[in-house]
Image: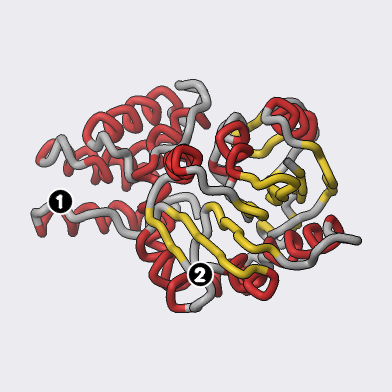
Amino acid sequence: MATVTRPASSGDLLIDRRFEWARESLAGGDAAGAADLLGQLLELAPRYAPAWFLLGEAREQLGDGPGAIEAFERAREADPEDGQGAAVRLARLGAVAAAPMPVGYVRALFDGYAPQFDEALTAGLGYRGPEVLLQAVERAQTGRLSRFARALDLGCGTGLAGVAFHPLCDELTGIDLAPRMLAVAESKGVYKRLIEGDVMQFAVAEKVAGRRYDLILAADVFMYFHDLSAFRDIAPLLASSGLFAFTVETYDGDGAILRDTLRYAHGEAHVRDALRAAGLAVVSLDAASTRTEKGVPVPGLVVVARA
C-alpha cells in the first residue's frame, strides 16, 4: 500500500480524463507516454498535485532521478498536506532527510483502503500482527493477572488487534488518523472509546489528563515513524508495571531505513536504545514476521516492555 488509490479530482473533467489516461499508461509500462501526457496536462493545470506526483513516479521509472525529485517537490508545494506522500518519495530518493510521514498522506492512504483493508491484509499479505502480539503478551503475563483493566490500541485501524485483545481487556480505547478505518473498527463492537487523531498528539493529551493504561498496543504502527523517540511520550501513559507491546519491521543494521515499500525498518539496537531512553524495561524481544511481500516474509520484531 504505497499510494492512494484515487486522488481528488482536479475539478475539470477533461484534465481528470487525461490524468486517468496517464495513470493507465504508467500502469501498463509506458512511462514515457505517461510523462508526455502529464506534461501536457500540467500546462493546463500547473497546481494539480496528483499529476506532479504521478509525473515523479513516471520519471523515476525512466531513470530520471533529478526530474523525479523536481516533480515530487512540485507536488508537495501544490498540496501542503501532502496527501500523495511526496515527502516520503523525496526521502526515498535521498533528496530530503528522513522525517515523520505526512499526516495527510497516512490518513489518505488508509482511508482509501478501509473497505477492503482486512481482506487485503489477512488474505493478500498473510497478516498476523495481532496474533503475534497476543502470543507475546500472554508469555509476558506468566504468573501474573491475565486481564487488563484499561488498554490502549495505538493506530488501531479497523480493529484487528482490538478483536484479538478484547477478551483480555475490561476497557479498550482505540486511536487512529483515518475516520473510515475507525468506522470499520466501531462496527466490531470491541472498543469503549474510539478517537480520531494523531497518535502522538493524543499521547501528550492523555498524559496531561492523567490517564494511565495497563496495556498499550501498537500493531504495525512504527513502520510509519522514522525514529522511535515517540516511546518517551508513550511511556508516561503506562500504569505501574503496565505493558507496552508492539511490532516493527527490522533489518540487519543500525538506526532506521526507508524500505522500497515506503515503510521504515528499525534495527534491533535502535529499538532497545529507544526503550531504554524512555525508561522502559525489555520483557521480550523476538524475531517475528507479521506479513509477507510478494510471498516472502518481511523481517520483523515483536516486543514487550514494562514500565
The circle on residue 113 is: none
**In screen coordinates, is 157 left or right of 298?**
left
**In screen coordinates, is 302 left or right of 223?**
right
Q: Nearer the viewer, residue 255 or 126?
A: 255
Residue at 78%, 35% (x, y): give it.
268
Residue at 76%, 44% (x, y): give it.
305
Label 1 neighbour load within 10 Å: few <14, some 14-19, many 20+: some
Secondary structure state at the residue bearing disc 2: loop
Image location of residue 281, percent across then percent down: 79, 37
Dot placed on the residue nearer the N-terminal end, 2 or 1: 1
**To which quarter of the image does residue 85 belong?**
top left
**Can residue 30 be seen at all in this image of the molecule?**
no
Residue at 45%, 64% (x, y): give it.
193
* Residue labelled with disc 2: 191
Residue at 24%, 43% (x, y): give it.
38
* Residue labelled with disc 1: 10
Q: Nearer the viewer, residue 123 or 21?
A: 123
Is 8 situated above or below 281?
A: below
> Quadrant where the C terminus lies?
top right
Colour logic: secondary structure
